[in-house]
Image (cartoon, grey):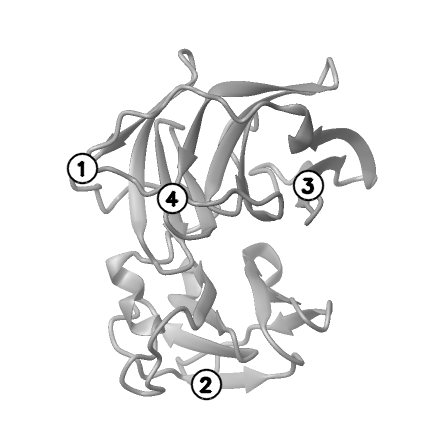
């Protein structure tokens, strides 16, 4: 989703991305990665990144706060596109990133001057963004805790460290799939690769959860709170099912 809820980007394993208006649901643009050359300017990096074979499967998408840029992760690579809605076309930035592992999460800061990228092994890197120059530069500076992110707090944020069930469930690799927060209720929801949703109190510093549910058949791909409706949406990867959960406050606990 775009931050204003007007646009939806959908990625496919064919290397294509559809851009649609949300209301009404209508396709307005399409990005085909096969049309673009893989040669791009290297990003200034504080550490040498290992190369990996590129895939066309879209693994993560994220709109910038101003909706004018779409970040597209395809396997271990990341590309950025300027979205020109009036001209119904997208322009690829002359820059790309390559990670050792598959990219699973992308986040833009509210000012669109910082980007966070997380792989399926939870490697997290931050980049300063210049929209004017269409450039990215890796930064090693500590990230401020009060930054507002889209679409949510990065999965590896310190305040969410208890979502990973290392001791409770003996997780060892990439079992934590996604998470979202509901600030007014001070609750965080997490989804794992086994199809379980857990609710934690914010900040989620320990692994103990208020409750856990399992209604999906197999892995969950995404979670999204809808605060004004007090709802949580979960999307199943294997069962291709969307479930809407009602979030209720009971005895000062959710």
Picture quarter containing residue 112? top left
First-in-chain label (4 vs 1): 4
On residue 140, which mark appears? 1
Residue 109 seen from this side: no
Residue at 40%, 68% in the rendered image: 174
Picture quarter containing residue 37? top right
Q: CA distance from mark 4 to mark 2?
A: 35 Å
**Which of labels 3 and 2 is toward the front?**
3
On residue 211, which mark appears? 2
On residue 8, which mark appears? 3
The percent coordinates of residue 123 (x first, y second) are 31, 53
First-in-chain label (4 vs 2): 4
Label 1 with label 3: CB-CB less than 8 Å: no
Vertical side of 134 occupied by 195: above or below: below
**Which of labels 4 and 1 is toward the front?**
4
Q: Which residue is mark 4?
A: 99
Side of 90 where 141 appears, left or right: left
Q: Secondary structure at mark 3?
A: strand
First-in-chain label (2 vs 1): 1
First-in-chain label (3 vs 2): 3
Q: Secondary structure at mark 1?
A: loop
């Amino acid at each position: 989703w775009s931050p204003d809820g007007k646009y939806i980007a959908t990625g496919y394993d064919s290397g294509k991305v559809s851009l649609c208006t949300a209301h009404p649901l209508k396709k307005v643009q399409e990005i085909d990665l096969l049309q673009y050359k893989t040669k791009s300017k290297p990003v200034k990096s504080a550490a040498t990144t290992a190369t990996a074979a590129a895939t066309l499967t879209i693994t993560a998408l994220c709109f910038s706060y101003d909706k004018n840029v779409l970040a597209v992760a395809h396997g271990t690579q990341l590309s950025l596109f300027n979205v020109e809605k009036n001209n119904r076309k997208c322009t690829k930035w002359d820059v790309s990133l390559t990670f050792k592992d598959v990219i699973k999460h992308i986040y833009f800061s509210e000012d669109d001057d910082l980007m966070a990228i997380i792989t399926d092994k939870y490697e997290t890197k931050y980049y300063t963004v210049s929209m004017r120059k269409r450039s990215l530069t890796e930064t090693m500076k500590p990230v401020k805790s009060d930054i507002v992110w889209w679409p949510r707090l990065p999965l590896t944020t310190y305040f969410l460290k208890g979502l990973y069930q290392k001791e409770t469930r003996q997780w060892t690799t990439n079992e934590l799939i996604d998470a979202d927060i509901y600030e007014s209720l001070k609750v965080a929801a997490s989804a794992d690769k086994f199809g379980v949703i857990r609710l934690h109190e914010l900040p989620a510093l320990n692994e103990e959860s208020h409750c856990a549910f399992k209604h999906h058949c197999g892995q969950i791909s995404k979670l999204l709170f809808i605060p004004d409706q007090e709802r949580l949406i979960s999307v199943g990867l294997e069962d291709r099912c969307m479930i809407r959960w009602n979030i209720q406050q009971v005895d000062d606990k959710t």
